[in-house]
Image (cartoon, coloured by chain):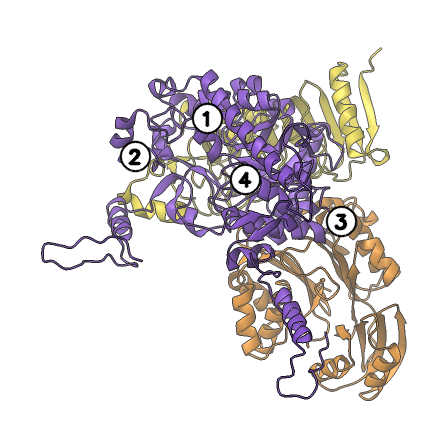
Chain colours: A purple, B yellow, C orange
Amino acid sequence: MTDFIPRGEDGHVHQALWVWSPETIDDIQTKAELGRYTNRGLGTTRRTPHFQDLTFVPCTLSRVPLEGYRETCNTAVEIGARHGATPIRLATPITIAGMSYGALSRNAKQALGMAATRVGISTTTGDGGMLDLEREASDQLVYQVLPSRYGFNPHHLRMANAAEIVIGQGAKPGTGGVLLGAKVSEIIAEARTLPPGVDQRSPCRHPDFVGPDDLQIKIEELREATDGQIPIYVKVGACRVADDVKLACKAGADVIVMDGLEGGTGASPDSLMDHTGIPTMAALVEAVAALREMRLEGVVNLIISGGIRNGVDAAKALALGADAVSIGTAAMIALNCNRPIFVEDYHRLGTEPGACHHCHTGLCPVGITTQDEDLIARLPAEEAADRVAGFLNSMTQEMQMFARACGKNDVHDLEPEDLRAMTIEASAITNIPLVGTDFAFRPESFADAVMRAMAATGSTNGHTQPAKVTH
Amino acid sequence: MATLTSEIDCSQHTTREINQAIKRAAADGVPEVRLTNPAARHCLAVAVMSPVRVVFDGPVGWYCGGMSDGVEIVVNGNCGWSVGENLMSGSIAVHGNGGSSAAATIRGGRVFIEGDTGARSGISMKGGTLIVGGSVGYMSGFMMQRGTMIVCGDAGDGIGDSMYEGAVFVGGEIHSLGADCVEAELTGDDRAVLESELTANGIDAGGFDWKKLVSGRKLWNFSKHEYDHWRGAL
Amino acid sequence: MCGLCGFLYKDAERHGPVGRVMFDMLTPLDRRGTDSTGVALYGEPKTGTYVLRVRMEANGSTPEDVNEALEAAGTVSEAGHTGGNFRARIGYDGDLGELTDRVEQVPGTEVFSIGRSMEIVKDVGDASDVERAAPYSGFEGSHAIGHTRMATESLVDVAHSHPFWARPFPDISVVHNGHITNYHKLRRRLAEKGHRFATGNDSEAIAVYIADKLEEGNSLEDALRSSVHDLDGTFAYLISTPDGIGVARDRFALKPLLFAEDADQVLIASEEIALRRVESSSDLKPRELGAGEVRWWLR
């Protein structure tokens, strides 16, 4: 089936090439003008193997579903108790991911905090430190320790409910952050101790440690600084997931936050966003396997993020073994990101509502990823908080709906066995059987299935007796 | 009645106990805590947020004094990596050698190391003053944002790489300058600062051939015409 | 990522409790990894003989099998074992590569080390775990290097533990902290030249690299110097030889390494906390090795 391709004036069909597509042509010519690589906000343009490729198989005859109204379905979870700290208590297994005050406006941060408090979850500071508005608004605030240490204040650390050492994020693992000059306003510059208007480059490594063996000592320092009271998270972009999860565990993390390729960012080179990291669903499977190998599943908590769009994705993530999911982009969209209002301002940026990823310009038409006062005024915090809380509640309801349909009275009892894979790829990645079959597309499963098939059919392949099979 | 000094034998306590004791002493208004047998243990005197004088009779490990605000620390021995990291205010004096990343990302206060320090000393400084009586290692002053770094001895390769603001003074030899790091003329104010900071630590400022290093500001905003500057920095 | 330590008596005649020194230094380095711990110890050589350390896997062959393989090659003495750790001395003057192959033909064995005086002891767990499995703290010798492991990308088992013997060169081994990021490229090149890799551990490549340089006729010092350019990634490493210890650090000084010395001894470690466990270190002033710096101490 081909899309409609118009004919040119000469009556012939002129087809765009795959390698030298219009996008690639534009990209090359832009880079020729700029003399450097291009940046954008939000996330990858790739269609990745994703939770979208899984489906649930709820109760039918073999199991009994639970009623949606009177039969409770628990959603709460405690995070971070491995070393005896006061855990973060999530009323529903969702957290708001780290997004900087600087990338986001103060109204956006405040609204996220208010919504989180209302719903009973946590928010996270970002590359720029703690905003007092967010601390006031958010009952449970996770304080990020980033390579740049912009705005890092140990007094704020001691006021936080958890600390998150950021090694990297899914959108741009292995690299530092970028905040282009347009967003480095006087206020932001002062908070980050930078000259206003510079193209701020964040380092890719922490200033005071290198490597997982040093990280262990750094984690000890953070525990000493906070008298052992708060959980210590380690956030990584999904790359060599198995190795990194094991190292984070060995270094002493209470919680691992695993951010997949689909993870968002305020600004990053395009090429990094699309060509680094592995998809969240794949990362999750690998992380859980690593935790199991370390015998730390359920001891070290696992939060995953990167392209979680709704309660369905969250439910599937829980089924695959996550303790909670973290949302960044989805929360922004609930705030108003890409809403079709102030449409002429989207056009001025050269984009449309529904396709805007221009966070890096600082001219967000709806007042989220900007420091411009006039634009910020377009996002009154109360209403925005309502929207985010509404979305979070919808996610909770969805998770519960799937759990009940599968006969569970706790969303954390969802299991991989409640799922089937819609594609061979998803099956191979998650080790979940392909729909219509009873095996997952993995070598171990293949070998099993072949053995069973040979045994069942008494297959002889021309021999008088079945071939002797030894495992 | 609060005693004038408190003595703690580190060999008899866990790190947590030692740090809690220091913090308690600070809260109780005990003016000085003396610690024996630190034996280069890590994470000592971390996040001490109120004024107290802490003296270590022996070497300390990594992160000594890290994230503190208002503490006064004296180390009679070496220190490990990242001494005083993110110091908000106060002072740390190390009568020995320091490790890498000395005074990493400090925001205020003073860190003085009598001997040599390692690579990336003064990395990402956001204020405050770092004084090194000896030499500093590779890429010291990397991504300095604000503050003052004084190196009486030599500076290893890549000094002051990618500085935003702030100044590095080097009394000995400079092996090589980092990206966008340039020499500037010393002002009268600079000389006064050198005089006062070094005299306070028993060093004669006049005995050195001071060079002042600052940001060339070519990396502040990307310009494709300055590709030579950006090639190493992007 | 790991913890390293080393110790040397400078006087060529002097021997002492190097095993104890290693144990004391390795114990506080457990923070840098407890996946495994290992040492290369240099005892008193006995003319005309080599000392071997061989690992036997459980349910594999017996010490008698190993003994038999050795006896076919030379005169065996001092044969003994603790659990899966076999040790013997052999009177032999042939090719050590061949001897190694001969032993490893016995199923489930791996030769940890061969040397006039070098003995490698390593196992999973921390310094105390290894002491229980194959006691080393009572060892008297001239020098030693040690390692605690936090595995980065390769397996956690005995075979992947340090020190790595630079086979087939007697008395040379390596311990490494960091991660060699051009490992696969280096491995392919060295394997093509005929070198043997026993594990998937990037640190092993350093030992093989050094062996290769020696085979080409380079001095140990030159091999150390060229490694700083040829190895990519992060590294601080110690190399032990019959009469000395060498150290190298990557050009960005990314992994810690300190040393301290006086007229009698040299102490090396990733952290001062390890140095301070050694009684005789109290007057020493440790300092960091510089970026890209290479240093060499000979007895």
Identify which amino acid the numbered label 1 is placed on: Arg
Left or right of A363 on screen, residue A73: right
Question: Which element is circle 1 on?
Answer: helix
Count of marks overlaid on the render: 4
Q: Mark 3 points at which residue?
A: C30
Evaluate if marks 4 and 1 touch, with contact meaning CB atoms under 8 Å apart: no
Which mark is nearer the camera, 2 or 1? 2
Which mark is nearer the camera, 4 or 2? 4
- Foreground residue among C173 and B172: C173
Label 3 crowd (10 A; few <14 / some 14-19 / many >=20): many
Q: Name the residue under label 1.
A: B191
Give the image location of residue A102, x and y in percent: 44, 27
Q: What distance separates the C-alpha of mark 2 from that of mark 1?
A: 57 Å
Identify which amino acid the numbered label 3 is placed on: Asp
Question: Which element is circle 3 on?
Answer: helix
Residue A352 shows which numbered tag? 2
Q: What distance separates the C-alpha of mark 3 from that of mark 4?
A: 43 Å
Give the image location of residue A39, x and y in percent: 36, 42
Which residue corresponds to the image point at 78% horizontal and 75% vertical from the top-left? Answer: C109
**Quarter occupied by residue C166:** bottom right
Which mark is nearer the camera, 3 or 4? 4
Which residue corresponds to the image point at 62% horizontal and 49% vertical from the top-left? Answer: A287
Query: Is there one chain holding both mark 4 and mark 2?
Result: yes
